[in-house]
Amino acid sequence: GNINSGNVHDAIEYNNELYVVGHFDLIGDAIVKNFAKWDGIRWSKVLDKFGNELELSSVSELEIYNNKFISK
């Protein structure tokens, strides 16, 4: 997919999905703020356990530790 109006700072694979973080409002055809995932078919928002969109502004790197995202 295309990244519109911004850029990606880091990408990481987790649970067979590609997670990207950066500064963007739209990725592919999905309106997503700064943190998105690709499941091989479509881009979507990354949601917390309560169903809220995670935005992660000002993050330049992602890592995973104990199955949780760590931002830098």
Image (cartoon, rainbow, N blue to C red):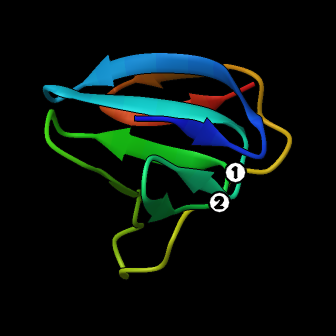
Note whether 33 is above or below 42 in the view shown. below
Decide which of tag 1 and tag 2 comes sooner along the chain: 2
Coordinates of residue 21 in the picture (x, y in percent) = 61, 34
Note whether 45 is above or below 64 in the view shown. below
Q: How many C-alpha atoms fall within 10 Å of the one at disc 1: few (<14), some, or many (≥20)?
A: some
Residue denoted by label 1: 56
User: In this image, 41 relative to 43: left or right?
Assistant: left
Q: Which residue is drawn at 68% across and 19% down?
A: 61
Q: Which residue is drawn at 42% across and 67% down?
A: 48
The quadrant of the rendering that contains the C terminus is: top right
Q: Residue at x 61, y 18 (%)?
A: 10
Q: How many C-alpha atoms fall within 10 Å of the one at disc 2: few (<14), some, or many (≥20)?
A: many
Residue denoted by label 2: 33
User: In this image, 41 relative to 2: left or right?
Assistant: left
Task: Name the element at disc 1.
Answer: loop
**Callout 1, which amino acid?**
Leu
Query: Which numbered circle lies on residue 29?
Result: none
Task: Name the element at disc 2.
Answer: loop
Q: Residue at x 72, y 48 (%)?
A: 24
Coordinates of residue 57 in the picture (x, y in percent) = 80, 50
